Image (cartoon, grey):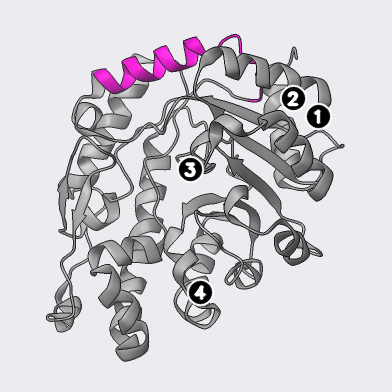
């Protein structure tokens, strides 16, 4: 593979638009998930150092990766900006302590929307963005963009939040309306400040502004079709309208809600975990919808990663789903494995 950055971007953009010529873009990441742990959350220099070292190590890997930097502040930024305690730890993204639970639901009406320019949580995010772009020529991803449902389920204790969709729907809608407005304003403020943007999201795929904003909507995977129809899609649609398009991600099995997701106005792409969804159902649900589909199968997504032939799995995905609008995102534990897998994918895709 000997592609320029522009050629990679053109191919990826056409794939999101389902206009690719049979080429399937793929990214082979290296190592485990890079979370906003205590080591990185408050240390801008350490984050920058990690990013530079990571992309330097990926130099021999022949794929559609383009060196970039993830601000990496965790998925709880929106909730933290609303006043939730945001607790860095050594295991993953900062833990979020909810403000609302089954005993104080009425307090949801007293929660104020944060000012996206002066709120200290958002100001910290902008400080990191400024630090990174002042000290690196690499383009930036956005700081994590949670969906309204994900942010809502962090502000409001998870079980009570889901229960209240049935028992107190007005309160849930009240919160989701304010969260959605904040998400839109926070993303727009980041875009105003970022001088060299890589992607409209916080994950590795290049998403140009004309495709839309990527959101992480993991809460959707545990919802019924009816509750997602009422509490998920309308707010995602507002984000799609605000940014001229949407790329929707959810971990887990999304078969119950995917038909509703695919009806989101302006939807340009979905980003799902191939190992957690029935391929036949997913393909049937996608039929007739011209949306790009990133299919993820990182080594940790398999119960027995040492026994999986990632090249064969990749070929099976393409044979099953075809090539139109399909992007593959995978990973390996070691650099030699990544180099070998990417080279082999380059030979067969």
> Considering only vertical position in the picture, is 217 above or below 43?
below
- SS state under label 3: loop
Is residue 204 something that shows in the picture?
A: no
Taking the spot 48% from the left edge, 16% from the top edge, the residue there is: 55
Callout 1 environment at 10 Å: few (<14), some (14 to 19), or many (20+)? Answer: some
Mark 3 and mark 4: Cα distance apart in space? 20 Å
- Choose mark 1 or mark 3, whichever is in front: 1
Q: Nearer the viewer, mark 4 or mark 2?
A: 2
Q: How many marks?
A: 4
- Observer-side mark, 2 or 3, equals 2
Taken as a whole, is the magenta stretch helix, strand or loop? Answer: helix
Q: Which residue is mark 1?
A: 349
Give the number of the disc on residue 345: 2
Q: Quadrant of the N terminus?
A: top right
In this view of the protein, can residue 226 be seen by the observer?
yes
Span shown in magenta: 46-64
To which residue does mark 4 refer?
Answer: 234
How much space separates mark 1 and mark 3, taking CA atoms?
Answer: 26 Å
Quadrant for residue 183, please give it: bottom left
């Amino acid at each position: 593979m000997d592609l320029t950055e522009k050629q990679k971007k053109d191919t990826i953009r056409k794939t999101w638009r389902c206009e690719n010529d049979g080429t399937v873009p793929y990214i082979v990441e290296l190592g485990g998930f890079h979370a906003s742990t205590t080591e990185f959350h408050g240390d801008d220099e350490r984050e920058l150092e990690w990013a530079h070292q990571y992309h330097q190590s990926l130099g021999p890997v022949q794929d559609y990766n383009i060196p970039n930097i993830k601000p990496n502040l965790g998925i709880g930024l929106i909730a933290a900006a609303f006043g939730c305690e945001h607790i860095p730890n050594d295991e993953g993204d900062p833990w979020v302590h909810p403000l609302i639970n089954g005993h104080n639901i009425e307090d949801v009406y007293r929660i104020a929307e944060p000012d996206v320019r002066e709120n200290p949580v958002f100001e910290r995010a902008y400080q990191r963005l400024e630090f990174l772009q002042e000290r690196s020529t690499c383009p930036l991803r956005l700081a994590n963009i949670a969906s309204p449902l994900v942010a809502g389920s962090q502000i409001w204790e998870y079980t009570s939040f889901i229960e209240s969709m049935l028992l107190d729907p007005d309160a849930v809608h009240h919160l989701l309306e304010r969260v959605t407005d904040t998400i839109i304003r926070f993303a727009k403020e980041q875009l105003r400040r970022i001088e060299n943007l890589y992607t409209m999201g916080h994950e590795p795929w290049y998403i140009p502004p004309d495709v839309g904003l990527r959101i992480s909507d993991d809460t959707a995977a545990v919802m019924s079709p009816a509750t997602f129809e009422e509490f998920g899609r309308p707010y995602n649609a507002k984000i799609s309208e605000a940014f001229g398009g949407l790329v929707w991600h959810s971990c887990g099995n999304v078969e119950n809600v995917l038909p509703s997701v695919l009806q989101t106005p302006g939807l340009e792409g979905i980003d799902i975990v191939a190992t957690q969804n029935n391929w036949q159902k997913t393909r049937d649900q996608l039929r007739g919808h011209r949306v790009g589909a990133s299919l993820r199968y990182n080594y940790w997504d398999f119960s027995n990663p040492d026994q999986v032939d990632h090249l064969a799995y990749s070929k099976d995905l393409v044979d099953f789903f075809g090539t139109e609008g399909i992007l593959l995102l995978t990973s390996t534990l070691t650099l030699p494995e990544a180099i070998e897998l990417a080279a082999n994918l380059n030979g067969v895709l």
